[in-house]
Image (spheres, rainbow, N blue to C red):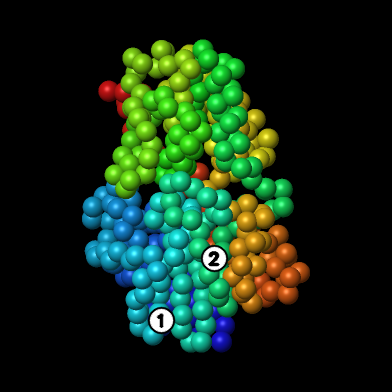
Amino acid sequence: MRAADVLTLTPAGLYCAAGDFYIDPLRAVPRALITHGHSDHARAGHGAVLATRETLAIMALRCGEGFAGLTQPVAYGGKLKLGSVDVSFHPAGHVLGSAQIRLAGAGQVIVVSGDYKRELDPTCAPFEPLTCDTFITEATFGLPVFRHSQSMAEIGKLLASRALFPERAHLVGAYALGKAQRVIALLRQAGYDRPIYLHGAMERITDFYRSEGIELGETRKVTATERPHLGGEIVICPPTALQDLWSRKFPDPVAAFASGWMRVRARARQRGVELPLVISDHADWDGLCQTVRDTGCSQLLVTHGEADALVYWAKSQGIDAEPLHLMGYGEEEIEKLEVEPPAEAEDA
């Protein structure tokens, strides 16, 4: 038996006929299993959604309470039967509530990773390696050049810059779901105990993380009147806000951006980033390769990202591998501001 006996690729995405469900579908479907709450994986309009409790709550925050006809929370490790397929959800280490989805049926065990990382993160459950016959993985950073630094070392760079330039505001661009809260938590772990200021786009998700017991310390929403007086403070904002009028009202701001893409210095220069911070919520090249080894899989399918290099490496290890070329994933960077008002209006 092969993965194709359990999962097939359709215009809506990965479909399991034996259980009559889709995984992270690209359009509205009758029943969807969702790996996590980023908008490139979690879309509104499905008839029914099965996901972790945290992911369902995040979808409600971002898409509205009526984002699906029915919802069903699934706990990590809990098993359910959908048709003839045994399904379970397991931590992916990507963001709060993120999950890999394990399928067992037709003599096959298949694991669909969703997005994941291997570095420990104080804001979500750590990645759980799962053995399987077929591993379906992302490859956002699937090139050998992408070897992420330790996140605490990058936080050290941010704090060193603040000490060197105490009169300047430090604006840290970070995605509203997951990265922003992780940067805050890492700053707290590094001993930073001052209030951390938030762009309005960060408030709802950050409040939700706090309600889930994530220790974030004191955060404050930035107001228009405060901005000129925030020299020496750390402000978390969407990456897009670094380049708009909102950012120019801070005192001589240092533009920082927390992303795995900051490994590529040309990207930092193109964005006008003065302080690139290589902090990623995706596995780097070594993490991807180690994860494939850990699964013991005989077949590797790559959904999105730099698939060709990872496929080539897997074949060199004797693993049957191919890219799926799924479109529509890996676009969380351009999620834009679905929870963010226009930069000037948010001060009202």
On screen, residue 99 above or below 16: above
In the image, what residue type sits under mark 1? Val
Quarter-of-image position of residue 159: top right
Where's the N terminus, which quadrant?
Answer: bottom right
Crowd class of label 1 (few under 14; some 14 to 19; many from 20; radius 10 Å)? many
In the image, what residue type sits under mark 2? Pro
Taking 137 as reference, is 122 left or right?
Answer: left
Front one among 238 and 324: 238
Measured as percent of width and height from the top left, residue 77 is found at: 40, 69
Quarter-of-image position of residue 53: bottom left
Measured as percent of width and height from the top left, residue 213 is found at: 33, 46
Measured as percent of width and height from the top left, residue 338 is found at: 36, 42
Residue that label 2 marks: 129
Element marked by disc 2: loop
Mark closest to the chain's N terminus, 1 or 2: 1
Taking 212 as reference, is 185 left or right?
Answer: right
Q: Say which residue appears at 38% left-offset and 65% top-offset.
A: 76
Q: Say which residue appears at 65% left-offset and 61% top-offset.
A: 290
Task: Name the residue furthest right.
Answer: 316
On screen, residue 332 above or below 314: above
Query: Is residue 80 in view from this perspective?
Result: yes
Taking 4 as reference, is 338 left or right?
Answer: left
